[in-house]
Image: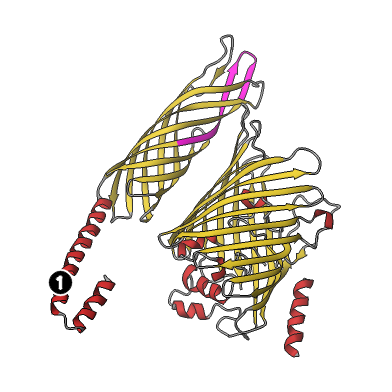
Amino acid sequence: MTRICLILGLVITIFAIHPSANAYPQFIGYKYSSCLTCHYNGNGGGALNDYGRALWSAEIAGKLFNGKTSDEKLAESSGFLGSTKLPWWIRPGIKARQLYYISDMSSDNERTDSITMQAEANVAIFFDRDQKYAFVGSIGYVPEPLRASANTEFDTMITREHYLRVQTTEALWLYIGKTDKVYGIRHVNHTAYSRAFVGLAQNDQTHGVIAHYVKPEWEWSVHAFAGNMSQDSDRRQVGASTMYEYELKPAWRLGVSALNSTNDYVANQRFAAHSRYGFGYGSAILFEIGNIKNTPERGAGTNGYYVYSEAIQKMARGYHVFVSGQAYKEDMVAEEADNFKLAVGMLIFPMARTEFRFDLENVRSVNPGAAVDNDSWNFMLQAHISL
Amino acid sequence: MKNVLVLSILLLSSGSVWAQATQSKSNQVKTKHSKAKSSKSKTLLKKSYYDVSVQYLVWNELIEASGPGITGDGRFQFAGYQFGLTHNRPFSGIRWVRQYASYLTIGTAKGAGISGTFTDEFKNQLWAALSVSAGITYRTTAVSELSLFAPISARFISWELASNAAIELDKETSFSAGLGFQFTHRFSTRSAMMVSVAHQFLWEATQWSIGYQYSLR
């Protein structure tokens, strides 16, 4: 009875007051091909499971301030309360992410700001010891969008993820609730063209049902969704998406995705093909190319493309350098500009539970006419703590 | 190697001396062969060699215009193909490589006036550049490399203006020096793809490039 009250209390707390969509598909470079290895959500993102926590501490993260501690010890102390064991039925977590950025550097529009991107509590509650039945949810602070109008009410406390997970057979997992949409490579850069313009940005989660079939050589997810229930019904994107990934050879996966959804104003269709290729130990190349088709109820529609690519290199344990290239065209017509982003940066996990990410991004467009737009430069520094 | 060892133990335990002797001989041959292969690949990595490459480059740059009643800056976009020959000299083991390269780049520029009384538009302006570069490469894995390089470039633009145009554009001949970063991914010991970003200080321009490299080993 006490446990039921505790579970109910936690569920209510979580719904009353949110997890991150922080997934690292680059870790195929460490030979971890499937997101299910480390995340409760088999499609990636959100809270880490016990194995994911241990792996982060003992294999991925550096050993700053604990160089003499063995990897086994680091893994053992990766829990929420360090090495203190929690009851089998509960796994809480806390995440905070702060962003410092300078946009349009050295221009008249230069802007410097610091944003708390994430400050949240998450929990996984298991209803059986085999973890076949589980509830996973999060709740927390979300910053008000810069472009939000003064008259629009914006709730800064949201839940980005809450779902029931059921493992029905050895290979089939069902997720019922609010999650990220199943589509493409789920990486952390939510301002990337492949996320921001596809409709997979940081607050684009949806309520629905996911069936995820996982085999060692391939995975297939189908997601039927009814939109984000915290939005007005006319704005909810209702539809379905799917993603299939096949392991061509160890640490090289090829995938295809499709998404079709609609609300009262616009119908969205997306299609993508991707590749995740790991090489050496800790290095990887990600590539995704896709089509974005928007058909509004009124006015002309657009049919554009996007590309996301990233090469990441492990330099030392916990320290990675990356180069990222992106392209986007809103509508594939001659008069439309092609937009490009080239970024170099570092992804650093100096020790367990901490992450720093530096990005220096150059944005450029290629117009069909003689006019040339100015390049813009953005600098971003993210600090992330995960307990 | 491990499998061969296990097989040897099994064969020994079965008492088949002949089989063991044959296997052991085969082991020696295999070991010799793999040693030869390994030392060959290490020698290959330590030897100096040349690369030939072709890259697509693009960058934006401000160019000043002047003439009777005309003054101001124009923003131009340069795009072109760069053909290169690089001499690679490994040092300090197999990880580090010094590079000396020379390039010929040809392409076109387009642009338009953005300030003052300079409002003209330009397209298909031919240009060519000669560059030399010194760099240092770190082989992060057997198939990937990160490089820093410092290019020095001389560029010639053949401004093609309307016959009655009383306008003069700057930088017909210009020089610049820069600093760049390159990521290279090898598909084989000979073929590689590279992406680079370099800032040319005197031109105040950031050059992007993507290209293919073939090693002459």
Q: Closest to the observer: A376 or B53?
A: B53
Residue A168 colored magenta?
Answer: no
Q: Is residue A136 above or below residue A200?
A: below
Q: Quadrant of the C terminus of chain A?
A: bottom right
Where residue B151 appears, as percent x and y from the top left, is 41, 37
Under mark 1, the amino acid is Thr
For label 1, the residue is: B22
Q: B139 left or right of A103?
A: left
| Helix, strand or loop for disc 1 | helix
Nearer-the-camera pick, B214 or A158: B214
Looking at the picture, does residue B171 appear above or below residue A265? Answer: above
**Residue A229 at x, y percent in the picture:** 79, 63
* Boundaries of the magenta span: B56-73
Please tell me which residue lies in front, B124 or B138: B124
Please give the name of the residue rendered at 56% of the width and 26% of the height, measured from the top-left corner. B110
Q: Is residue A314 visible?
A: yes
